[in-house]
Image (cartoon, grey):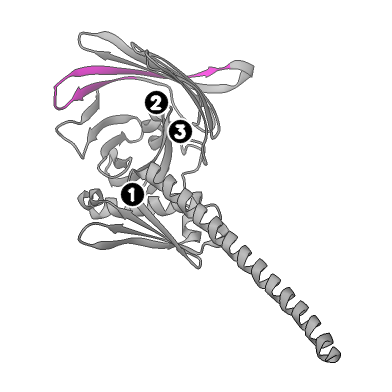
Amino acid sequence: MSRAGATFVPTMRRLRWVSGCVLCLALAACEQVRTQLNDVMQLGAALHTQFNMPVHVNIAGGALTVSMVDQAADKLSAADRDALALSVARFAYAHYAHPDALSRVAVTFVSRTSTEPGGSWPTSALVAQSSPGPLPSLPPNAFEDTLQVTTMDSGDAGTMERSFRSMTAAQGRAVWELVVTYRRRPQTVTSVDSLRLDAATFYPVSERRHNRRGLTHLAYDGAHVHGVVDSGTTMRAVDTTFAVAPFAGAELDMVIGALPLAPGLSTTVPVFYPLDRGILVRTTVRVVDADATAWTIAVSNGPGTGQRFRIARPSRLLIDIRDTEDSVHGTSYVRR
């Protein structure tokens, strides 16, 4: 009896030890699942904010799949759907908490009637092309121009006068200053936007925008954007650090002109717009045509948006911008 009891006690101890180990492993597995679920939810929220579409995110092994759930994508051309899918894949890979654990990212478009593949890429294809290089392909040149601005539905017209010049800022820093003055008819100044750009990279340094509603004053420190946006009735603070350093919306045509333009070029450009507290938009840029006088470039900020930029050769100056998605309510900009 005592021998059996002596044998039974250590057996129970072993069982308790094994049970404790199993419990620890189960808790660790549960914690891992919770962490991954939280990462997936955060990525889904970031994708929804960036692309303004409901999304489902799934991870199986090293494959991440993003399903865009919206019929708006049905209105896109095949080329624009491909560009959107690639932009979504790059964004998802760049913003997932553990990108090293991924081997492939796929995108699908889901509507009420069908599920269409958008594309699937190894992560190695998403790293090298995630954004254009910071350096312009050509040195900038000073210019002054005037753009005729027309709102299609109302016929309202105005002008956008721009000047671009080199200057020396505080502490001897070399910068370029872009001043944009918008006038509506009758010819009264309605807004002035002054933007200073780093001379070597085109990234913004500071921005001051003044109109009848108020004053916007922003400082750009790489990926960190901070300052205030004053609408005249409310003043909102901006203090955000993005995953990448953004360009400013006011300089978009010059950033496009500074890219290594060539037939087939397709890339995304991170652009900051100081609306409300500010938003970052991944703008898709594709060269769709080229002749001896100009490049024609399709530019989109997401589904249902699209503009056609024409950039002159060899000056790289803007010729015009026309809305390609909404010819009724859109706005055109034509160099005079």
Q: Secondary structure at mark 2?
A: loop
N-terminal of the two: label 3 or label 2? 3
**Residue 166 colored magenta?**
yes
Left or right, 254 with reference to 198: left
Magenta residues? 145-169
Left or right, 215 with reference to 309: right
Q: CA distance from mark 3 to mark 2?
A: 17 Å
Determine crowd level at label 2: few under 14, some 14-19, many 20+ residues with C-alpha closer than 10 A. some
Could you tell me the amino acid type at mark 1?
Pro
Per the image, the residue denoted by label 3 is 247
Q: Between 31 and 317, which is closer to the camera in this rendering?
A: 31
Q: Tell me which residue sits at (38%, 26%) in the image.
A: 275
Which mark lies nearer to you, 3 or 2?
Answer: 2
Left or right, 138 with reference to 98: left
**Residue 296 colored magenta?**
no
Q: CA distance from mark 1 to mark 2?
A: 22 Å
Residue 230, labelled with which disc?
A: none
Whether label 3 touches label 2, CB < 8 Å = no
Residue 54, labelled with which disc?
A: 1
Determine crowd level at label 3: few under 14, some 14-19, many 20+ residues with C-alpha closer than 10 A. many
Q: Between 169 and 79, which is closer to the camera in this rendering?
A: 79
Which of the 4 image quarters holds residue 308? Answer: top left
N-terminal of the two: label 1 or label 2? 1
Q: Secondary structure at mark 3?
A: strand
Q: Residue 129: image x %, image y %?
A: 46, 51
Per the image, the residue denoted by label 2 is 276
Q: Tell me which residue sits at (19%, 23%) in the image.
A: 150
Q: Tell me which residue sits at (27%, 51%) in the image.
A: 70
